[in-house]
Every structure is written in C-alpha cells, then in structure tokens.
Image (cartoon, helix red, strand yellow):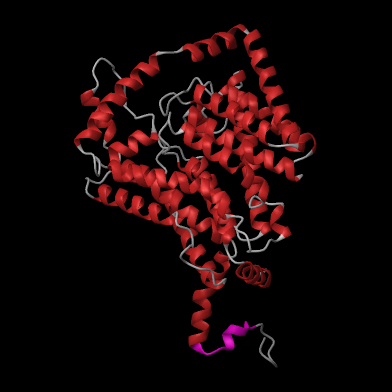
Amino acid sequence: MRAGSNQLVPEWAEAPPAASLTNLVLAPLLAVSRLTSQLFILMLAIFLFRPPDVDLYQLDRVALGLLVIACLVRAVLLRKQLWPATPLVWPMLVLCSLAVLTTLGQPYNAQTWSLMAAKFLVPYALYYFAGIVFDTPASLRHLETFLLVTLAYLSFTAIAQLLGWDLLVFPRFILDPSIGIHVDRARGPFLQAVANGVVLNVLGLVALDCYRRGRLRGLLGILLLSALPIAILATMTRAVWLSFAGSIVWIGLSTRGALRKATLALAGVAVLGLLISLATPNQQNALADRAGEQGPIEIRVAIYRAALGMAVERPLLGWGVNQMPREVVRRVEGYHLEAYWAHNSYLEILVENGLLGLTLYVSIAVGLFRASRMSKRPGKGSDERWDNTLAGDGLRSLWPVLVCVYLFNACFVVMNYQFVNALIFTLAGILAARHEAPERRTHASAVVAAQA
C-alpha cells in the first residue's frame, strides 16, 4: 500500500514496469502450479466419464494441456529433475513415437488419434507427471480419496444394474444400447464389462491397502469392501471373475494380519453372493449362460487367425494404429459383426505396431513390475510421513498382484480405455518416483509449504 494515500495499491504496482509485467504473467502460472494435484484428479474424473464412443475429445485434451503446463511450472519451481531417472521411460518414448509416426502417415481420423492417445500418449505422460504432482503426503491423500469414491460409485452402479434399479444408474448413457457393448452387464461408464471389472479389481486392491493402513475403517469400510465382490460378479465376465479370484487367493496366501482377515472376508462375501445368485432363477440362468457361452470364443478364434495372418504380412512395424478392425472384416467370413476387435492387447500391438512394438510393450510390462522395487532402494533413507500413503510399503507389496490383474485382463480386451491405463500408470509413476533422493523431496516439501 502506498504511504500517505487513501487508496489500496498492490505492491507490484509500485515495482518497475518490467517487473510488474513479469508478475502479471507469472501470477496465473504460480496459481495453477499450486493446484496440480486437483487438476490431475479432475482430469482422471473426465477420463472416467468419457467413454470411447462419446464424442468429448476436446475436453480431455484441454485438461491434459493444462496439466502439462502446471506440472512443468511446478517442476521448475521445486527444482525437480525434468528427465526421470527410470529406464522405463525409454521404451515408452520409443513406442509412443512409433505410434505417433504411424498415425501421422494415415489420413486424419479423430477416433484413430483418440485411441493412440488413450493407449500410449496419455498413460505414458501421466506416468511421468505423477511423480511431479503427487510429491507430498497431502496430495497422495487427495488421490486416495478420489479412488475410494470412484470405487464406491462403480460398485453402486454395478449392483444397481444387477438388481435392475435403472433409475439409480448415472450417467444415463451407461444404459444406452446404441453405444458400446455389454449393455446386459455391469459395464459402468466405460461401456465395456471387462474394463469396468479391471478398474473394480484394481481399486479394490487399493481399498485393501487403505484398510491395512487404517485409512478405511468403520461401517463405510465394511460396506465398501462388502460391495466389491457383488460388483465383480455383476460384470458377468469370466476373465474378471478369474482375475479377482486369483488376486484374493494370492493375497490370502502371501499376507498376514488385518490384510489376510479382510481378504478372507472378501472371499466369504463373494461365495455368499454366488450362492444367493445361484438360488435366484434369473441370476442362475444368467450365470450359467455366461459360464458356458462358446459363441464369443469361436468368433475370437477366427479373429485371432486373421490377425496373425496380418502380422505375418507386415511383421516389423505393423499396419498402424486402428487399422486392424477394418482389415479383419475382409478376412473373417461367416460372421456379421459391426466391428472386429482383437480382444487381446498383445495381439493388437503385434498387428498394429509389429514385432518392434510388441517387444517395447513387453518391456514396459516388465518395467511396471519393477516400479515397486524401485520405490524402496537401499541407502536412500525413509520418511515415516509416506508410510501411510499410496506410496508406502503396503501398496508396494500388493503391486505385483495389481499389475497381474491388468496384464491378465489385457489378454481378453484391448486396453484402449483412458481411465484404465491412466490409473495403472499413475500409480506406477508414484511408486517409481520414490527413488528420488530424500534431500530433493525435502526441498520440494519445503517449497510447497512456503507456497501454502
């Protein structure tokens, strides 16, 4: 405020013109940099309610662009290393570059660019930025809260569909038979039952970690964990059932204490829900039909043969992103489908990106497993504040199970769902970023506290 004046004048107004102009330019950037975790979570929410068949491409592009700017400003302010010290970024960079180049070589198609971004560009970018954004226990708690709320929403929606409570299903496009597939199953906002089941399973593992740490307790915790097996059952998808059962058995045999008790309780609820469903005539018929259905398997075998023939014709670099469905139509006879998708992420990568792309994709999968080991390097010290967060040892111990759930279901669906990929690679980026030197994290926390 200027002395001897009755008017309030900001301090920067008395600064030299050049300094005032700099402050005017930097002030919005500084404000945005303080909201990076909120922007990140908002973008995940947009991905959650933006299925592939709904034309909302611009919304997620704007959110991602704002997040990139905010993250870069934050990295400069906190003196963070802009190039992450993890070897996983190399195969990500090469595979993403290969996908972009092949897409540029095709006539412009908005869906092709959207699929390329959902499978490669967005998740790999979030892997990088997650370590910059979620660098404090408080920001990790914000993300944790969002994930638990998402689990509650997806579970409630799945159970509502199972019971026929259509009025409680939101948003309404979930029930629209003209978009997506599996309208008779609990497909959630992804419009695909396997994708919904993968997210339910992954978030269920996160919830188990929260329960072990005491972050999820009381009646709310009991209801949330009890609803999970019923929601998984409602997906009516064999791959989801198998991966959920496998993860429960894995955790039950490899853990002790509260986590094992919670896992046994989940198994009990799953068995009880299955018995109740088998005792209900309508549900019994639906479960029997799904367990014994052979039609989709025959169709997939035909598609696999056609896809392998395509891979043999162009083995090194493949056919390009989103080129497989239309080409398979010409090669598969005897079936009349609207689209011939691979239903296998590895096969589609082989066909569209060749042996080079598949090799890079496999190396990324191996790197995902290594993320949990990188997060606990010896000699780097420890910080007790991080132990009760998503970056603590609890999720690190469950991480191999989580990655196996993702990779196993990728054998039965093409993982071109932005939220699914974004969720996995965000958690991987958070775990991998923990190898950062303690003194650098201390400096970052001090700057964040000063800004607050």
368 relative to 207 in the view: left or right? left
306 relative to 349 in the view: left or right? left
Q: Nearer the viewer, residue 161 or 225?
A: 225
Q: Residue at x 48, y 58 (%)?
A: 86
Q: Residue at x 59, y 20 (%)?
A: 162
* The residue positioned farthest toward the bottom in the image shown: 4
Which span of residues is magenta-colored?
9-17
The quadrant holding residue 437 is bottom right
Q: Residue at x 53, y 79 (%)?
A: 23
Residue 71 percent location from the top left of the image: 51, 63
Visible residue check, residue 167: no
Which quarter of the figure is the N terminus placed in?
Answer: bottom right
Q: Is residue 238 shown above or below 357? A: above
Residue 178 percent location from the top left of the image: 40, 25
The quadrant holding residue 445 is bottom right
Visible residue check, residue 89: yes
271 relative to 78 in the view: left or right? right
The quadrant holding residue 446 is bottom right
Q: Nearer the viewer, residue 425 or 133?
A: 425
The answer to if 11 sits in the magenta stretch is yes
